[in-house]
Every structure is written in C-alpha cells, then in structure tokens.
Image: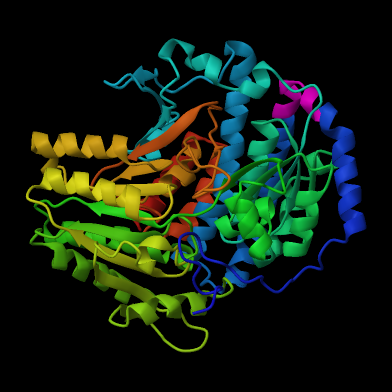
Amino acid sequence: MTQAAVAKYGSAAIPEAEHRIEPTSQSTLDEALAILQDHKKDWAALDIDERVDLLEGLRDGVVRVAERWVDASVEAKGLTAGSAQEAEEWLGGVSLVVRNISLLINSLRDVPKHGAPQLPKAAFKRPDGQVVAPVFPTDMWDALLFQGFTAEVWMDPGVRLDDLPSQQAAFYRAPSHTGRVALVLGAGNVSSIGAMDVLYKLFVEGEVVILKMNPVNEYLGPILDEAFAPLRERGYFRVVYGGAAEGEYLCQHSLVERIHITGSDKTHDAIVFGVGEEGARRKANREPRNTKHITSELGNVSPIIIVPGPWSKGDLNFQGLNVASSLVNNAGFNCTTTRVIIQHEQWKQREAFLDALRGALRQQPDRKPYYPGAEDRHQAFVGQHPNADQFGSKGPGKVPWTLIHHLDPVKTDDVCFTTEAWCGLTGEVALSADSIAEYIDKAVEFANDSAWGTLNASIIVHPKSLKDPAVADAVERAVANLRFGSVAVNHWAALAYGLVTPTWGAFPGHTPEDIGSGRGVVHNTYLFDKPQKSVIRGPFRVFPKPAWFVNHKTSAELGRKLTYFYADPSVTRIPSILASALRG
C-alpha cells in the first residue's frame, strides 16, 4: 500500500495531476502579488455601493461564461452531456456562484440600511440558550423551489441573542485601513469552490486575492479570469497556475498575508510544518515554519446515521437512491461524499436498506476516475476488504462503485473509518442497542469519535418514528451533539454547501497541530462572525424528485434554468423551472 493510496487518519494523499496550462513563473507571481499589494488599501476603503456594482458585474460575467464553464467541465471529466452528470456542473458549479453573488448583493445592501444583513426570520434561542439564526428559505422563491427545506446557523455558545447583529459583518463594522493580500489554493474537484472561496475572501473578509488553480481543473482558470474581469482590471484579483512548487512559493511569499486552502490535511501540514522527518518534528513540537493566518476546508469521512422505522418498499428505494446519489455525485470526488453508513444492528430492515442501496448503485453508469490516484486508493481499501460489493466495470482506468458492508464497529482503526477514500466508495457499519433512542446516542458517539473529520454528517429518520417522544428527543439531541460543521436531517449534508446561506467548514476547535477538517468557514452570506454549525432539515421523501438525485431525467436543463433564474429572478421563469422539475 503506497502513501498515495492511503494516508491513514485523514484525507487521502493525492498525486499531482499533469498540467494543462504552463505553471506561472516566479517573476509573474511576484508581479501579480505586487499589483495586489498596491491595491489592497483601495479595496479595503471601497464603499459598499461600489462593491455592489462590482458584484453585479461579476454576476453578468459568470452568466456570460456559464455555458463554456459547464462544457469545459463536462469534457475534462468525461461526462455525458445533457444527463444528470452534466447537471452536477450546473447545480454544484456555475449556478452556485451566481446564487452566491446574488446573496452577497442582498446582504451588502442591508449593511448601510440596518447595520447588518437582515435574516429571513427572527433569530431565537434553543432551550440551552444557544442562539440560532434561520438562513433558508431566504425569500418566496426559495420557499417555492425547495418546499419543506430549512436551514439554520447555530452560533458559538458565547453569542447572545440581543448581540447577534453586532456579531455580523465584522469587516464592514470595522474595516481594515491597510487591507490584506490573501492566497486561495483552489480545489480541483467542484468548479464552484475556488470561485466562492474568492468571493468570501473579497466580500466578507475584505481581502484582495490571488487564486492558484489546482492542476486538476486549471482549465477553468481562463474562464473564471474572464468572468471576474471587473476585479482583475482594478487590481483586486489574479489567477495563477501551477502545482506544489508554485503553491509553496506563494505560501512562503512575503506579500501573502493570509491563506485559504480547500483540499487535504496533508497539504495543510506541509504548508505549516513542512514535509518528511523535519515536518513531523516541527508538528510534534508545535513549531510551525509558516505562522500566517490560515483557514481551511480539508475533507471528512462523512457519516450518515439511519434511524430505524416502519419503512415501506418505496421509502427504502427513495433513501437508497438518496444515499447512492451522495456517493455517485462527481464520481465520489467530494469531501461531502457519504463514507460511513451507520445502522441499528437490530433493525429488521437493515439488509433491505443495503439491498436498496445496491440496487441504486447497480443502475449507475461507469464514471471516469478523473482525480489522480483514484485506482490506487480504491484498491487499497478493497485490498483490506476483499468481500466488498463492486458495481460497474473493473480493470485499468476503472473504479467501480463500491460498498464495504458489515464493518466491525470495534475496529475503530479500520481504514473505512480513519481515511477519506476520495473515490466512489463507501462503508456500512451497524451498532447494537436495546432501543432506538440508545442506538441514536451510540451512533452520534461513533460518528464523533470514530469517523475522521468534523465537516458534515446526516441523519435520516422516518416521520412516523418521530411520533415516539423518546426517538424525537434523541434525534434533536443528535443534531445538537454531532460535532460537525454541517448537520442535515433526511438529506445529504452537501445541501449546506449548495444552499450557500449556511456556513461551510469544519466544527470549531481544531488546532494547527490537529487540523482535522480545517478551521474557519466560507459561504456564510449573512456574514456571521462566530458561527458554530449549520443545520439543514428536509422532508423524508420529496416530490418532485430532488434535482441532485442521480436518476433525475431533466436535471441538466433544470440546472441551466436555475442558473439564469438566480441571476434574474422572475415569476415568468417559474413555470419552466417547475415543468423541468416535474419531468425529472
């Protein structure tokens, strides 16, 4: 087993991809940083009206390049045009960037009027006093398009309800007079990540940005550079290219003041402490070689807790498809991909659920394993679990959809619990308990303590199960006690990423020496200063079929329509959107 295949306890170690664009020279990197340094004060002093004007220009720019953005991703990832595969590039890519920009425009317009972005509903306190801010639906359009879905941001326990407005929009309450230059190390998997990380650094934290594209998706760099031209032309933004060498040069550069990483904890540790024996020594002795302020989102062995209940065959099929969709999306190259399914050992329908999941996976076509090292990582997991179920083609250049079932919960050092597979592979484990409520508590403990990372988790529960007060209390206890930056009820926790108004990042508390899933948040379009976690809730079963389900027939056209709707909401666009949704 090579290090590139499995790096135990953490996110996978990823080999560097071949470059499609020549790495940016050091002299050009120096020049880009000098331009940003010269303009950082201007950016810090820019008034909100000008920022809104710039955002409107960015939105127009993204809309202009939207088709090319998606086409480039479809070609590079080997996707089937017009299918649910293409839909991933609309729904998880360009449409989210447009939505993010529109939400930032709304929030920034609120700041001079009200002092802080205005929530869609009043914040409130939980019984234990923790402050909760509703952040979705944001308006009547969200309520119509996502019926039954809600999202909240739970604040740090030290935040008081009457002080919440003063805990929003910190940069706009006390803007930096000097400004800062931020480096964003872009992710290579989902096309919206780099763009939205840039938006956060610029418009929430007030920093000018140099974005280094990941070699895996650097083909998007020129498209993003064109879309964000209003920022580039004024000296607030630059796109550059390269791999680890260019990243190292930028991270150590004297003009880079802050860093944001979306990627691997291994990358974080290399930046902060170095590599090899010297890096290990520095980490053990808490002697970082890079002391710059670093925020990060570094992956997760994402758990889904299945609560036993009176599930019909239709329920099993729906939820089997729900979980399969969370695995198949983007060929499994997501930090939100379901990696551990937790079940109740005594549930009579445990095997029926697994069969429903197998049935859904069996129907999925092969996907190009476009991320470097995927085959090696897959083989490293299957090598330890040769009885794994595999669906699809095998052999060179293939990574079958894989279910490693009936894992032993006692073996907490199992690779399925300790390492993010970073391919189309998930595991399943069952916990013994005398009651459903006891099982839920045990599942939460297992997710917190045995599944690596703190980024996102889900819990799925039938509405009839919630009629039992003990189960209902246990579910609410689970939502509160899961130590993850995002917790979703009944759906894939990636919704926290996709809705954009929630925060996206690890649960607070990681240190540089034990970075886990990272530090800090992004998205967060209501500009909260001290968030703890986001909580998303949705119906157990949804009609029409969710657009992110892998067998949605019209999701590509739906994703395209949503992109243009987010840029220009109108009641005249709604019938066409609903028609596409109903035909899914």
The residue stretch that appears in magenta: 43-52
In the image, is residue 395 above or below residue 84?
below
Residue 542 can be seen, yes or no: no
Using the image as rendered, state which of residue 310 and residue 56 is in the foreground.
Answer: 310
Place of residue 533 in the rendered image (x, y in percent of width and height, measured from the top left): 42, 35
Residue at image point 11% right, 51% down: 309
Residue at image point 75% right, 23% down: 176
With 318 as the anchor, is 333 left or right in this view? right
Q: Is residue 47 magenta?
A: yes
Place of residue 416 in the rendered image (x, y in percent of width and height, measured from the top left): 36, 66
Using the image as rendered, state which of residue 457 and residue 502 is in the foreground.
Answer: 457
Name the dominant secondary structure of the magenta segment: helix
In the image, is residue 203 above or below residue 565?
above
With 384 as the anchor, is 58 left or right in this view? right
Q: Is residue 48 magenta?
A: yes
Residue 235 can be seen, yes or no: yes
Using the image as rendered, state which of residue 96 and residue 394 is in the foreground.
Answer: 394
Place of residue 526 in the rendered image (x, y in percent of width and height, measured from the top left): 53, 27
Q: Quadrant of the C terminus?
A: bottom left
